[in-house]
Image: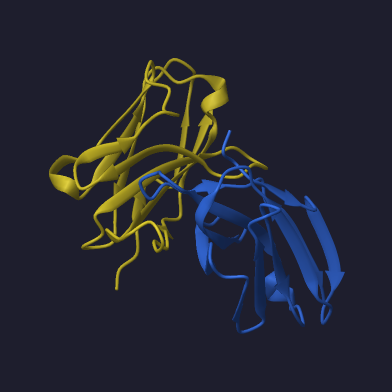
Amino acid sequence: EAGVAQSPRYKIIEKRQSVAFWCNPISGHATLYWYQQILGQGPKLLIQFQNNGVVDDSQLPKDRFSAERLKGVDSTLKIQPAKLEDSAVYLCASSTLAGANTGELFFGEGSRLTVL
Amino acid sequence: SQQGEEDPQALSIQEGENATMNCSYKTSINNLQWYRQNSGRGLVHLILIRSNEREKHSGRLRVTLDTSKKSSSLLITASRAADTASYFCATAPQNTGNQFYFGTGTSLTVIP
């Protein structure tokens, strides 16, 4: 079974530029998450999709971050314009549509962003 | 913040010893999970414990949960060099839609 795919693995940009990350979840997984992991910290939830609808985006900095999940499969996360503090690894995870008592997350390898 | 906290932040042990790390959280939960992250990689699920469970085992892993203290511990027995990684707890708070909040992590180094 193929895992969660993310691209690009690495990206270096200058501040105020834009960047986009792509995620392809495990086939059949209805729920998709984007997490931001700053070096030395735990992952921070940015946005959660269930199929193509947003369940929670309360921690997404909406003035510069946007995300979409067209057709309930692939997802893109965009940052425009980027700030120095956006330097982090952006992790995509997916899980099956299940009750709150289950729900193992499957993570991709992450996209490492460096903003200069 | 709903993020949990792991303790200690860093742990260094000799191969063959046991490693214990703790997680504290703030809100009532449906379940708590532990994940491992090797350097530069994504997170890998280790074990899930539900709020009505007190202890769970998986291979060399033992997880306990004390909902009255809002805390959990992960014990890795007979550690190996390959266990060197960061370990995170993730909580699924009640009354949320399958959201998971990660702690700050414990960096474990197992010395061969």
Q: Quadrant of residue B63?
A: bottom right
Total marks placed: 0
Residue A61, relative to residue B29: is it above or below?
above
Q: Quadrant of residue A19?
A: top left
Residue in front for this viewpoint, B22 or B9: B22
Q: Quadrant of the C terminus of chain B?
A: bottom right
Q: Residue furthest front?
A: B68
- Chain in yellow in the render: A
- Chain in blue in the render: B
Residue B78, relative to residue A42: is it above or below?
below
Q: Residue furthest left?
A: A71
**Is B5 situated left or right of B102 in this image?**
right
Q: Quadrant of the N terminus of chain B?
A: top right
Looking at the image, which residue is at 65% across and 59% down?
Answer: B87
State the image coordinates of residue B96 (x, y, percent, origin top left). 40, 44
State the image coordinates of residue A96 (x, y, percent, origin top left). 29, 61
Does residue A116 appear in the picture of this structure? no
Residue in front for this viewpoint, A33 or A6: A33
Looking at the image, which residue is at 39% across and 61% down?
Answer: A103
**Is A68 situated left or right of B33 in this image?**
left
State the image coordinates of residue B5 (x, y, percent, origin top left). 69, 46
State the image coordinates of residue B76 (x, y, percent, origin top left). 72, 74
Residue B50, relative to residue A66: is it above or below?
below
Does residue A85 appear in the picture of this structure? yes
